[in-house]
Amino acid sequence: MRFVLSLVFVAVAAAAWAGPYDGRYRPDHPSADNWDCKTIGKDRGAILLTSNIFFALGTRCTLRDPRAVAGMDATLYNAICRADGDPWERRIMIMKREGGIAVIQKGGHINLLRKCD
């Protein structure tokens, strides 16, 4: 019985901490139609976004200080990212769009991502 109650607590806690963009994504481009949406962090594998972590190929970013963007379905974050070598900091805006999200980074670089089914 304790095990079942523990599972219920974990499920409720996970739902409470869920972020507005949580999910697995792939590039929103026909060339990415055959990406593997089950594998995370590998070449042609899914990009995972959890409540405060963004996993992509070779990169993991911790998303901090979320700020809603007025008049848009978007959030601006301070991101601490790490790949090979020293961590770096950048600003990232994530915005909902039909079928997925847009990730806008430094210099106006925009990645359109489609939610995996």
Image (cartoon, rainbow, N blue to C red):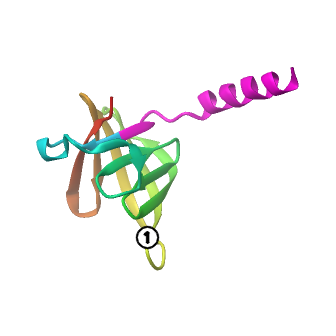
Residue 53, image x and y in percent?
A: 50, 50
Picture residue at 35% right of the left edge, 44% below the top: 94
Count the marks: 1
Outermost residue toward the left in this view? 30
Q: Note whether 8 is above or below 96 in the view shown.
A: above
Q: Note whether 40 is above or below 91 in the view shown.
A: above
The residue tagged 1 is 83
Picture residue at 46% right of the left edge, 79% below the top: 85
Q: Note whether 57 is above or below 96 in the view shown.
A: below
Picture residue at 19% right of the left edge, 45% below the top: 32
Label 1 sits on a secondary structure element that is loop
The answer to which image quadrant residue 13 occupies is top right
Q: What predominant SS class does the magenta segment belong to? A: helix
Using residue 18 as the reference point, say whether residue 111 is left or right of it. left
Outermost residue toward the right in this view? 2
Using residue 5 as the reference point, say whether residue 22 is left or right of it. left
Outermost residue toward the top in this view? 1
- Bounds of the magenta span? 1-24
**Towards the viewer: 67 or 96:** 96
Residue 71, image x and y in percent?
A: 31, 32
In magenta segment, residue 8: yes
Name the kind of residue labelled 1 in the image. Ala
- Give the crowd class for mark 1: few <14, some 14-19, many >=20 residues within 10 Å: few
In magenta segment, residue 42: no
